Structures are given as C-alpha cells and as structure tokens.
Amino acid sequence: MRIVKLVCLLFFGFLYTLSNNTVLYAQSRIRGKVIDRETKKALPGATILCLKDQQATSSDSLGNFVLQLKPGEYQIEVRAMGYKILHKKITTQDTSILLALDDEANAIEEISITHRGKYRNRNNKAVELIDLVVRHKSQNRLRGKDSLSFQQYDKLKFGMVNPKPIFKLGLSDLNFVFNNVDTTQFKDKKLLTLFMEESNAKVYNKKNPSKYKKIVYSQKKTEFDKRYINNHNIQSYLNYIFQPIDVYDESVFILNKQFLSPIADNGKLYYKYYILDTIFNKEGYFIQLAFEPRNTTDLLFKGKLQVSMDGSYAVKKAFLSIDKDVNINWINQGELRFHYRKNEEGVMLLDTAHAFISFGTKRGDAVFADRLSVHTDYQLPAEIPEGAFLGAPIEIQPQADQVATHRPVALNSFEQATYDNIEQLNNKKSFKTMLGVGYLIAQGYYNLGKFELGPLEYVYSRNNIEGNRVRIGGRTTQDLTDKVFFEGYLAYGTDDQKLKYYLKSAVSLNGSSVVTFPAHYVEATVQSDIMEPGQQLSFLKGDSFFRSIRKNRPTKWFDTQGYQLQHVVEFGNHVSITTGFTHQSRNTIGDLRLVNSGNPDELITEVNSNEVHVDLRWAPYEKFYYRNLTRRTIKEKYPVFNVKYTRSLDGFWNTSYAYQKVSLAASKRFFLNQLGFADVKLTGGKIWGTLPYTLLEMPNVKQPDDRHAIDYVMMNQMEFAADQYLKFGFSHELQGFLFNKVPLLKKLNLREIWGANMFYGKISGRNNPYISDQVVEFDKNKEGQTMTQVLNKAPYWEGSVGIDNILNFLRVEYVKRLTYQGLPNVEKERVRVSININF
C-alpha cells in the first residue's frame, strides 16, 4: 500500500510539473532592494509597479522585493511615502537590481528634543514662523478653496500585534491565520490583520455655499459571519475613531478625542516650537521645526513640521506622535504622518495621510489600527457635475462591492492573504463556536441561525406586582430575510400568575432591507403587559434585571393592552417621517388609585386612548450602529432634531379623551478642543385638552429609543406632571484638563465630569386636580403622601460632579438634588459608582 501511494504521489507530481512547465520556464524572477539614495537605508513598504501589466509588489522590512516577469523589457514605477517617484527600465536579464529613491526633502526621523533652558515665545523665530503658518492657513487649507475634486483611496486595517502562542491553544485548525503575520511595517512589531477595508471615492468640495460630497464607487472589505458580527458596525466604529485627518484642522479628531493641532490658532498657548534645520532642494526652500507640548498629559502631539518659505508658508510634511504621558488609555503608540505635494501652480495638496495606533497595556501591545489615505488627480478649480451634492454627504454606490479596487499603493503579500484567510476562518466550526459565545456575552442573544433568543438581562426581573418575572423572547435575523423582521416575547409573573406578550413585525415597502439606511417600511405591534403610567409600547420597556434593583424603581402600574401601526420612510438627506396610529387600553392594578377629582367616591379603573401621530426627524450627517431595527446614533458634532405632533381620536374604540400634543427636541455634542466635550439636550412640549395626569408629561418615565432622553437620577417615578414643559440636560467631560495641571494627580490620568439636569413645567387649571373637577386626583404612596407634584414658579434642578477614569475603568459621581428638597420621600444626595471604559 505504501508503494502504491508513493507511485501515485510521484505520478501526480510529474503531471503537475508538466502542466506548469510553461510558467516555470516562461517567467524570470527578479530580486531587488529599495534604499534611500542619501542615507543608503532600506525603505520598507515601497510599491514597485510594472506599468505594462500592472503587476505590483512591495518591499519588506529590509527593503527587499521579488518580481516574476516574462522575458523582455519593462518600465517600472517605484513609490514610497516622502520620496520622489522613480521610473526605471529593467530587463529580465537583470536578476538583481538596486533602486535608490530621492527624498523630496529630508526624511522625518524619531524626535529627540534636548533641554534648551527657559522657553519663551517672545523673540522666538520658530514662534514667528508658526504665526505666519497660522495666518496663511485659510489660503492653504484645501477646504478653503472655491472648488476642488480629487480621487481618494482609503485602506483601513485592524488586528493583533505580536500574537502570542497562547492564542493557538485548543485552536489548531486556526493556525493558518497566525502564519500571515506582517513584519514589513515595523521592525519590532508583528501585525496580524483581522479586518481590512479598501475603498476608492471621488470627492467634491465647494466653499460658497459650503458643500462636501464623497462618492464611494469601489469598496472591498473582510466579512465575518453575519449571524454574530455586524460588519457594518465594525466598519462604522473604525471609521469613527479613525476619521479623515488634516494637520490644517484646528483639532485632529482621533479615538473620540480632539488633539490640538500644532498649527491651531491658539497653538502657542499649549506648544513649544524650535527651529531645527533649513532645507534647499529642487522644490524650494523649507524650514524644519520641532514642537512639543507644554504639558505632556494634555491632549497634544509632539513632532516635526516642514514649512515652505516661498511666501505661502504651507506645510510640506508633518509628523505627529502621541506622547506616552498623554491622559489617554490603552495607547502604546500613536503616529500620524502627512505629506503634501506641490502642484504646477505652487499649491500644496495633501498627497498622503497615514495614521497608526497600537493598543495595549504597559506590558505590551495587543491590537492595532491603521489607516492610509492617498489623494490623487486633483482638479483645482473643479468642474462639479450638476446635482453632485444631492443626497447624503457620503454616498456608497449600490454596486461598489462589485467594482475592482484601484490601488495607488500595492498590497503586500500579507495584506493580499487577509481576505482569503477571513473567508476560511468563517467556515471553521471552532471559530463559529467562539463567536457564538462572544455574541451571547456582548449582545445577550443566543443565535439559532434564522432566529435568536434574548436578551439575557431580561430573562429574570422582579417588581411589586409580578414578583419574580420570567421572560423568554427573541427576534429574527437576516438569515431568514432582511425584507421582513419579527421580534417578540412571552413573560410570566409568579405573583399575579398572568401571561404577558409582545409581537412586532416590520415589512419593507421598497424591496430593500428594513435594517439599513435609508429604509422604507411599515410595522405593526401588539403588546399585553404591565406598564408604568406614561410609558409607550416597546420590546425593551425597561424591566431588565438591573432596573429592578434600582432605588427609584416603579411601583405604580397599568395592565395595558396596546396596538400600534406605523409607516416609516427615511430619505438620503437624513430626514425621516414616521406616521402611525396607537391604541392603548389601560386598567389600574395593584395599589394604583385614580380617584375622580369631582367625586371622591368614584374610582376610575380604566384609561383608554387612541392617537395618530406624525414624527419628523432630521439628523444631518448621522452615522449609527444598528442591529435589526435597533439603532444607536454615533455621537458626533452634528445635532439631531425631532418634531412630533399627536392627536387623539376620541369617541372611537371606547375612548373619550380629546387632546393634542406637540413636542420639539434637539440634542448635540459640542467638542471644546482642550476642554473635552459637552452633551446638551433640550426638549419642550405642550398638551391641549382635559386629561388624567397619567396622560400628561412625566419626565422620569423611560421611553423607547429616545435619543433626547434625560436621566433624572434624584427624581422619583411619577413625581411631577405637566401639560406644558421644558427639559434640559447638560453633561461635560473635561478629559483631565484640570487634573493634568496638578503634579501629584496627573500621573493617575483622572478626568473631571460635571453636569446638570432641569425640568420646568406647568399644569393648567383644567388638568390640575386641586382646581378641576374633571380629572383624577394624584395618587398616594403607602405612607399616605401624595406622589405627584405640581411645580411652582421654580424649576426642578439636580447637579453632579465626579471623577472618571479611576484605574482606567471606574466613574464616581456625587449627585445632589438642588431644588424641591422638602418634598416627601425624596433623596437629597447620592454617590453612584459605575463602570466606564473608554480611551
């Protein structure tokens, strides 16, 4: 048998040799090396492109490369960041070649700034030069041009650094992935890419009026198993923390933080500048200077700049690095590189922007993120097609994933293998098991393919009506279909011994997915459950295990039967319109008492309502994470607005209340450069009609998917009611701006937080049970104290101060009730501790 196997093996080997002899003998292998002409140092990551057949490769960490070509003469092009493009003729007889590139100026090396004595801005030539750079920013910044267009290639990578053998234990069938470790980018780092995205786009920009459009016409990325990994969310998150960057921006946004640019308008207050060298070459006269932060713990860079001295004072090169002392978590290395190329008119155009960050602990790196952007084919001024700016600012064409990617910088062999490796990985049973466990822990759902059970935190909870509540629920996945969506649950309470249920379905109306933006669908909901007064129908109505152990958990309930039908349409400019009809039949249960204010002997046990509503929402430039119909907005600097009109249908389906409601809401995150960021939320509304107070506005009742919701920590449930109201929420995270100035504290990387919440409302005479005899009296607690109050002329306020990033994951806040402290059964102050993990 062994002889037979050996003969067969030799036979097939012979056939393979015969079938491939044309390749073996028709191609020549050319070995080469790319070096810096002046320093003779090897250049890793250089791209070597054969112009004849577009075959390309890249040099490794020692500058070496290999090309396999058919016999003949060829013209090759060699590119490396910061070096002039080299064109050279070669033949296949040249079995070994040396390619020397000329630096466009001087290469930026690692920074070493020695002590220079006492630093002064006055009479400092470096500061005078920075003043000139700042003064000329408006004319050098590309966004400031009347019009321009260019081609943009982006490559975004995420993966592991120096993967250890421990990751291979018990996963022998996954070893092939760990063989694809890239050693060409850094000598001291081995990079294993697990996610990679490439895209080609056409970008248009106009100054007056200010408009921006990016049309992605080609896109390729790794795809994990969609049952467990939402690839869109990975892409969205990495693109959020690694946004397009430019040294001309006042602040460079990276990792959800704003690092002040060294050429910011007020950069002199935070940076020190030193002139290092003068540079003369064919492109002109440049001055190279270094900069460093005055306080190394602030969100600042250190690095070098090259500035053109042709009168434009434009930046030619920039190298920015994140100091190891910066008040930021999990970052071991952060580098940003910018390279600008002068066009025929002498305008410096951004050629390449490269950002690399490695994440980990003091013991070493764990993961990395890398983004490369290459800009080519500038048109300045640009001929912008009519209608180019219509729709969303960033538009991905429908067939983008089917268009071949054009790469101005070739992939190395490790990057080329990433796509195939991830596809193989998805087919491994052990990897699927690992993803399933991770999904259950992270999302709380157990995936069954076309359906998933969960969420885990809602399986058990407790309240004063149901006692122990057990719930089983789930939702469909895209494996079933992305045109129709279902979610629902069944719940049972051991004390009331009643079955509760919820079912919701959404059906696409435009033949596209009901999940992705922009969507157009109709949805129907039915729910039978106990609900807090003022609460709307929802799959996640706040009855999780963690809510049931809060101090101010609800104690008053309606037994509610609800039906809802809605139509949702979203437009490319991030305007959406939701119209719908909702019916709710509510019956008092437990100790909830609604006594007629005109007759103390009459107890109202049923409150029914029929409502039609129109909700207009505008969220310019919005990006979000999603899973099925659940979306979470990625908080950027752009605001979100809502206007909602509601009208009752009285006299229909056992209802008698006639009323109208209007509410307006807005929320926005303000990035304050070195002072961190602040979130502001504002909501106002008015209700017309005579209603029981349970149908009025109660500010501390949880509503589903409310982007503008304010968490009133010190306010009891149902404590206030109003038919005209204003809500305001403010929270500010200073990112360590003050603590960084305290010598003993700045090493701890602590961060300051503070905020305030306000509610102001009035209740008209027709709805005030102390005045009107057509409504219901406010209910009382077990001690006989009135639970719901009418605000007087003063608004309700609560404030908080705290310390974040304790041991890199804890947040401690002191929360104090500032007004209405004399009301019964209220807390005046509280200390709360929470887990908050962030960069």
Image (tube, helix red, strand yellow):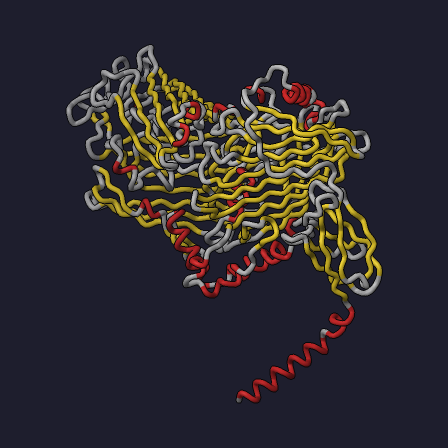
Above or below 593: residue 399: below
- The front one of 303 and 678 is 303
Across and down, in percent, residue 425 comes to 51, 60
- What is the quadrant of residue 690 in the picture? top left
Above or below 216: residue 347: above
- What is the quadrant of residue 779 in the picture? top left
Tell me: 141 left or right of 538.
right
Across and down, in percent, residue 512 comes to 57, 47
Across and down, in percent, residue 103 comes to 73, 40
- The front one of 164 and 534 is 164
Above or below 351: residue 35: below
Above or below 213: residue 457: below
Tell me: 282 left or right of 183.
right
Viewer can see residue 440: yes
Residue drawn at x 54%, y 36% as measured from the top left: 623
Across and down, in percent, residue 697 comes to 36, 24
